[in-house]
Amino acid sequence: MPGGFELTTEAKRFLKFMRDKNVEDNIFKRDEVRTLYNEEFKRSRPTEYRIAFGQMMRTMTDLKEVQELGDFYVFGKDIQVLYERMKSDTDFSKKLEEWKRKARENPFFCETCGIECTSEKSLVEHQLGSRHRIHKLHVDIYLQRDLNIAIPKGLKINSQPAVDKNGFMQVDCKAGEECRMRIEIECTMDDADVVFQKHIFLWDTGVFTMYKGGSRRGQRWKDLHIRKGEIRTFEIQCKAPKDFGHHYVPLALYFVKKDSSSRALIEKEEEGAWAQDYVLRFVSLHVLGDLHEALAPTSEFRKPERIRQKKFEDTEPGEPLPEPAKNGLAGKLKPYPIPKHLYGYVNKGMTPKAERMGSLDDISLTINSEYLSKVLCTTTPRIYSTKFHHLLWIEEIQMKTDIQKYDLNGVTMDCDKGKMILKVPGLAERRPSILRGDRIYISISDNHPDDHIVVYFRDMHLNADHQPKKRIRYEGIVHKVELDHVLLGVSRKLRDNWLKGKRYDVEFSVSPSNMWVQHRAIESSCHFNDLLFPSEDAIHGDTTVVVLKPWFNIKLNPEQQTAVRNIVQGTSRPAPYIIFGPPGTGKTVTVTEAIIQLYVGQKNSRILVCCPENTAADFLMRKLMKAGPILKKDIFRMYAISRARATVHLDIWESGQHNYDEENDCFLYPKVGDLTNYRILVVTLMSCGRLVTGKFPKNHFTHIFIDEGGHAVEPECIVPITGLMDPTDKSGRAQLVIAGDPKQLGPIIRASIALNFGLPMSLMERLMNTIEMYKTKPYDERYITKLICNYRSHDSILAVPRSLFYDNELHSCGDEMILNSLLGWERLPNKEFPIIFHAVMGLDEREGNSPSWFNRDEVAQIEAYLDSLLEEKKGQKIKPSDIGIISPYRKQVDKIRLMLTSKTSSRKQAKKQTQDRSKIAVGSVEEFQGQEFNIIIISSVRSNRDSSYTEMDIIYNLGFLRNPKRFNVAVTRARSLLIVIGNPITLEQDRNWKAFIDHCDRNNAIIGQKGKLPPDHGLKANTTTFSIVPDDNPSLRAQTEDPAWERRD
């Protein structure tokens, strides 16, 4: 039989065998390790070295190379994650039940450890051993944690630091520091002594060591007697690891009672014995960053109180915007008021169906209103308009509620040059978003009888009650928007009664005009079923062979060329042609080439280019201007009159091809006759509605392009369709081209019902999901082309989104010098794999009345990475502008920005910080859509020490989760390095994030607390039925993420 040295050598050889199989620091079920050992490793060894599996694992445990917990082995020290998972994992409960059943059938089977012994003697020996004690401790913690935290009568235990209600003793420290905890044990019994038998750490990560006060470190003790009044002191030495966040280990202190007279132990079954074997504590280190205190909550979180809405008897109009004679698209927009009966239906809310709680994606919702259920649950030509009218109204109801969270009480206003000036907190961040022409209302504050103001957003109204018996509000119209304040045109009466220091209340409301534009488009939709519900039978295409001009962009790949050729040929007429452009595949390049080919090759072509947002429209305008063949006089960018001059890109501004009027110092709409002279007109979808209002001629355009079509709701997408195409002349209609990616984010939707019943789905996505000619794979290139060459990201970064969303068809085709530029970076755990998942067991917090979350431990980890990335060194220099930091929560974005600009940031790195970190881009996932950076760092924020989220948490509060599109956008922004920082327990509750973490795990790219879930692991949540009832509360998205208000002008 091998001796001690041989056992140690073989144990290290088996560990190397496991690591060579690319399973370093992974978590395995016991049977998996036994199979690997017996069938592969043991057979490969000479007969004299073939050690039994049990003996091998005991040796490895003694060497601290392996740790055992429940039915698992952990190769390495990262066992905290496994414990976190198992304590809320019903799989372990099932395993315990199975072991109990086997113990009833076999008297020699240990129901605690799942081990079959050969005899009663071997079972007793096993139960007296350390392995059984460890397993029993874990099972006890799993089944009756609260009971074992309690201190039995007659025993007094004092701790420094004090123990919280969950049994945690926590010390805060910096990375690499050493500190101590203290435990004092006292016997308070007259008739018995206490015997402190031993202590057990449930696992050993090298962070905590316990020894008796006054003794040498490492000196062991056993069965320490403590008499009445005697106090024994024990020290716990703590050495902080370099990873930020919480690191803890369960600690069991084993005691028995000993009769003072007979000196005999009081056995458990005897009268007066304690019910518990041990007292449980969790010793915990919270490793803090340098800015932990600076980033602390500014005040305790309190749910914001809604400002009571006041009733007014009259509204006095404000000063309207000047009405220039030059405004050429004047017209009246029909109102579409919310039906009063709809409020009652909406307030019935929804109920989740949780028949299978295997994952987040198994949760579905049903509407509690039978009426709404019939209206919203399908999208067919018969109920198309009814469904979308209702979805828009439901969203508008929620928007009206959400905007009220920005209401102001008791604020002062200034008055200058006939305008009242209102300072609006959060204006620069579009919380709320205010545009020129919006309205506000002002009234005297109740707390200040001499004055009162109320401000509404989009419909801003001001109210000052100068007549005590009649409450009046005063309308204020926004004449100008500055960085943090707005200039309001109000009635002369309000201006004349203004006094410095006078207090007003301000309420914000949402302008319904954009909603009305969409309602109007929906109203005419019944005449366009061949476009909205196309069928292959109706396709006639254009049989005339069109010869394309030589490629203006010679770098187009075959898929891009196919899309351009079919668009110019008109192969899908009268149905839309779709360009399906995954991240970084050159979608806009393809659209640009198609427009140029039409412009040059078809002299009678007139092209309308629409985008959901101004940023996308400006980007495409600049691309077309720089393309070369397009004459400056033939292209025009029309802005909404609410657009601020400062937001226009310099290239467009200097071209003069826009509708800014110098005389009136604002944007004005040109006349219809002037606009028809341009061959290419670039607008947003909502500005396109102004063309409809201005009676722009039907079928004027030969081609209508909607770029970023996946980022618009369907009612937005059909504005140019139903408004600018002639329902009576189908042959003269424009060829519709929609380009986008339905796998990426759409617009922000706030209402839960609208969110779950179709409003976020774009026209493009609905066609690809439900219409046979678009959804059948491989795609028919006559109707749809999928771009598959990604020019942005390293192949390893593409791997997971490629598998989850793009049928494994994306190819990395970018510049290898850029994509491979950070391979070999010193912080990469795998030098050939440019991804890091850094597991941080942090703490999510809130502050003040903000509903948004932040996590200081993750901020500290971000700072550590920035210190390393931006450190001055030889070779490639990384600039702050190369880095983007994404977080789903506004408060985390704020804290990260504070860290970047803090003067105390990383004092120890101060000498190395020669670059301006304020140039690092920081924002939400939505803000990063369409952007790319060489390096992306993602902070997921949410973390929970108990790892047991309720169903409400899962559906709403884990905002970063449960949305595959959000995940897809976040992980596809990086070119050469992607770093994700978060709690793996939280993230793995979503199957997409679990796939990403598994991808990192397979490639040895996990840092911090790590491990992998068994394949059958699923979400285990509280499945108690509840209802999601909007009532008059802010949306759950507004309560958790506080997203910016989108500008759709």
Image: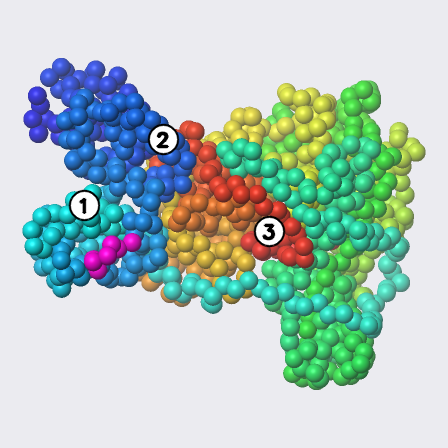
**Residue pictured at 35% horizontal, 54% vertical:** 166
**For mark 3, does the 10 Å Cα neighbourhood hold few (<14), some (14 to 19), or many (20 or more) residues?**
many
Q: Quadrant of residue 212?
A: bottom left
Residue 384 visible in the displayed image: yes
Residues drawn in magenta: 150-156
Residue under circle 2?
97
Colouring convention used in this rendered image of the protein: rainbow
Task: Where is residue 815? Give x, y as percent.
Answer: 49, 35
Q: Which residue is mark 3?
A: 1037
The residue at 64%/73% (across/down) is 409
The tag earlier along the polypeptide, 2 or 3, is 2
The N terminus: image quadrant:
top left
Q: In the image, 531: left or right of 105?
A: right
Instruction: Mark 2 vs mark 3: give the one in front.
Output: 2
Residue 126 % position (x, y): 18, 31
Marks 2 and 3, how far apart at CA? 40 Å
Q: Position of residue 954 (x, y in %)?
A: 52, 44
The quadrant where residue 415 appears: bottom right
Please give the name of the residue rendered at 26% of the width and 37% of the height, measured from the top-left corner: 135
- Which numbered disc, 1 or 2, marks the residue that appears first in the sequence? 2
Residue under the image location 76 percent in, 79 percent down: 465
Q: Amino acid at mark 1?
A: Glu
**Magenta: main secondary structure:** loop
Viewer-side label of 1, 3: 1
Instruction: Tell me the residue that label 1 is attached to.
Output: 270
